[in-house]
Image (cartoon, helix red, strand yellow):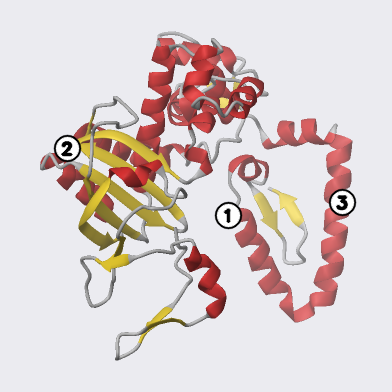
Amino acid sequence: MIDGKAVIHISVKGKIQLKDESEAKTLSHFAGDWSLGPSTSYMLLFERKQLGTPVETSEASFLGKVLFAGVIEEGSLLEFLNFLGENNRSGVLVVVSDGVKKSVFFKEGQIRYATSTDPDDRLGNVLFRYGMVEKDKLTEALNDRSRRLGEKLVQMGVLGISDLYRAIKAQVEEIVYSTFLFTTGSFYFYELATTASLPSHLHLATRNVLMEGVRRMDEMSYFRKKLPGAEVVPEVLKDATIENLTAQESGILAFIDGRCNLEELSRKSHLGIFDTTRIVFHLMQGGIVRLKSTHSMANEASGGDENIDKLLTAYNQVFQLISAKAEGFTPKLQRDLEMFLHKLDGELAVLFSGVVVRPDLTIDQA
């Protein structure tokens, strides 16, 4: 996959030349014969004449001719995915954005499989995020290259067949959901050359996946107002009235101990980060749970109030000196510090919430 940095010049005589010869190494990975596919005045598409090299991935064997190609704009992939589902299309949608390639396999309008070059989308990482396998067992299985990861974990007794199916389903869904966030890049829809050996037996209704993905996007942006990241730590209120909870809410509540963050809770509950965030948010709305306070988190991290005061005093002394030296630049530095604190997320956003930067660049926990 090319990251988009290589620039090719085509002369009026049709000769092709690299603008920067240092990019030749990048293109050398694509050595072979290519034919010009469907193109426009602003985008050229080349297709490999034959696979030929052992470097080619097994995915390439499923790709036929290009049927559609386009540039990604906000919302365009959602519309195209819906088109594929509504028209019962079969093929492989390849999406490329910011150096990442994701492929979604369709059979008669249903999503059957998905792949990704993003390490976060690998099956092992999905299994770990859902708490279905511990790091040591995952490492052991990954070290055995004689079998596919899922098969090895089943053989080891770590996973059952139903667990593996659930994990692959979650992996495919998360890959598809993640493409909704792409606002730049390009996409290509290939004819499906063969369905004889698709590596998955999933049959996911495209409409349902799209609706769930859009719902998650909308709800997560709402949840993030109170739960800014997976690193935040919830704790149970001492005087909370706990009643009429669902099974999932009771399950999450049992793991909330004032030490586990959302990511750790999602592994312990096997629910994944979205459902864990949703449930903790509802528990907060019900007055049962709150985020651990800035003071208590900082107190535990530093070893006590005395250490916090010492750190704050040292920080303020340093920035008072900077302010004195900066003279006329102090207002800009103050704005930059405020902007930096405003952009923090996760646990840091909680720790620095309510912090005010004074004109002399010292900070005050308002």
- Helix, strand or loop for disc 2: loop
Q: Nearer the viewer, residue 162 or 330?
A: 162
Image: 323 above or below 119: below
Please give the residue where the numbered disc 2 appears in the rendered image. Answer: 109
- Helix, strand or loop for disc 1: loop
Residue 177 in view here? no
Instruction: Give the alpha-carbon distance from disc 1 to disc 2, as whole Å.
Output: 41 Å
Contact (CB < 8 A) between labels 2 and 3? no
Q: Nearer the viewer, mark 2 or mark 3?
A: 2
Residue at left offset 27%, top offset 51%: 77
Residue at left offset 46%, top offset 59%: 98
Q: Residue furthest front?
A: 52
Q: Position of residue 105 (x, y in %)?
A: 28, 39
Residue neighbourhood size for the residue with mark 1, other residues' Cα within 10 Å, grouped as few (<14), some (14–19), many (≥20): few
Contact (CB < 8 A) between labels 1 and 2? no
Q: Position of residue 279 (x, y in %)?
A: 45, 23
Q: How many marks?
A: 3
Dot placed on the residue nearer the N-terminal end, 3 or 1: 3
User: Which of the 4 quarters of the picture holds residue 337?
Assistant: bottom right
Instruction: Give the alpha-carbon distance from disc 3 to disc 1, as whole Å.
Output: 24 Å
Task: Give the numbered dot on residue 291.
Answer: none
User: Which of the 4 quarters of the picture holds residue 156?
Assistant: top right
Q: Nearer the viewer, mark 3 or mark 1?
A: 1
Residue neighbourhood size for the residue with mark 3, other residues' Cα within 10 Å, grouped as few (<14), some (14–19), many (≥20): few
Please give the residue where the numbered disc 1 appears in the rendered image. Answer: 343
User: In the shown orientation, is residue 135 left or right of residue 5?
Assistant: right
Q: Nearer the viewer, residue 104 or 233?
A: 104
Amino acid type of the residue tagged 1 in the rendering: Lys
Residue at left offset 52%, top offset 13%: 155
Please give the residue where the numbered disc 3 appears in the rendered image. Answer: 313
